[in-house]
Amino acid sequence: MDAGFALFFFSQSMMSAKALSEALARHAPELAHAGCSTAGEITPAGLEDGHVVAILFPRRTFTAVSATIHDLSTAGMDEVAGEVEGLRRELHARNGLARSGNVFAICLIDGLSYAEEAVTSALHWALDDIPLIGGSAGDDLKFETTTPISNGHVGSDCAIVILIATDVPFHVFKTENFVPTGEKLVVTASDPERRIVREFNAGVAAEEFAAAVGIVHSAMTPLSFASHPVVVKVGGEYYCRSIQKMNKDGSLTFYCAIDDGVVLSIAKPTGMVDSTRAALKNVSERLGGIDMILGFDCVLRRLDARNRQVFRDISELYRANRVVGFGTYGEQYRSMHLNQTFTGIAFGQQQAAE
């Protein structure tokens, strides 16, 4: 294809990051690339597990540059902004026609770094009007190690930023399927650095959550959290703050930033199939047809789809709309780090642009 850049999304249960990186160095040494481990893949056949997905960007229509931000736990906003500024200069040097209107940014970040909010905010500030989309790497729900890769580098506690200029029409979007209820949980004791809530409403977090949604706390699983999301109101909009797991002491670990005093509302899921179909239809109408969609789909949506027996319907929607991507531990959309959301960038036919 004369690809100028490639993205790889891989299950660590199927292939290690080291093995994939070594294979790329051996078989495609000139191919610039980035990628990360997953919590499930979105393939041309729909939702799958235990695969490696490759997406090649033809050099004729895409110009891509990338950088790795290391040591996220200590990286400051100035460092992130400096990397982005360097990428913007490099992209302009390689593609003098690159303007903000035909450039987008992708972020792939260690999904266990606890740094997504800070990095996403810094990237958005530095990118100015360039739209940002992305996903947090997964590890098949083991919650041990997630691994981004980039041009021979394999590591954790890092984020990969990619700027891509193209003359193919594109549209960045998101969709979710929940509405808030009147049931409130106030964080009264937490460990913000580790995203752990110890108490809701001055009671043990797991017990208070279970009582609020009407389930037995000792029987809670990731499916319980996927089916009963909690949301926070920011700037007039509600955003999901998903629970990752219950700990032995009854505390709850979250996928997103959390702190004392945060007020969460129990949310009620709405029809995932209908909301996803409507979002994809809207995107298709905007672009005059979809060539493909690069998608970042929260692993909790996948779990909830199985629980509600709509997994095949969602998988077929993705297949029919040419969605390719991976299951995430969190999604990036413009300035926000999100949960239980599908974020994507849809590409139209190049002829439409001409």
Image (spheres, rainbow, N blue to C red):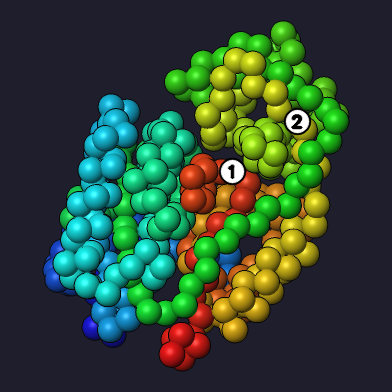
Please state, as top left, top right, bottom left or bottom right, where the N terminus lies in the image.
bottom left
**Residue 226 pos. (x, y %):** 68, 42
Identify the secondary structure beneath mark 1: loop
- Please tell me which of labels 2 and 1 falls first in the chain: 2
Identify the image quadrant of residue 310. bottom right
Q: Amino acid at mark 2?
A: Ser
Q: Amino acid at mark 1?
A: Asn
In the image shown, does 290 or 207 lie closer to the viewer?
290
Query: At x 52% / y 69%, what residue is drawn?
Result: 171
Mark yes or no: residue 255 visible: yes
The answer to whether residue 140 is above or below residue 256 is below
Identify the image quadrant of residue 237. top right
Query: At x 56% / y 43%, what residue is drawn?
Result: 338
In the image shown, does 106 or 36 lie closer to the viewer?
106
Residue tagged 1:
339
In the image shown, does 130 or 345 lie closer to the viewer?
130
Q: Residues within 10 Å of mark 1 (few under 14, many from 20)?
A: many
Alpha carbon of mark 2 to alpha carbon of mark 1: how far? 14 Å
Name, please, the residue furthest toward the top.
202
**Residue 108 pos. (x, y %):** 38, 51
Identify the secondary structure beneath mark 2: strand
Residue tagged 2:
265
**Residue 117 pos. (x, y %):** 46, 36
Q: Residues within 10 Å of mark 2 (few under 14, many from 20)?
A: many
Q: Which mark is residue 325?
A: none
Decide if residue 128 is on the left or right side of residue 49: left
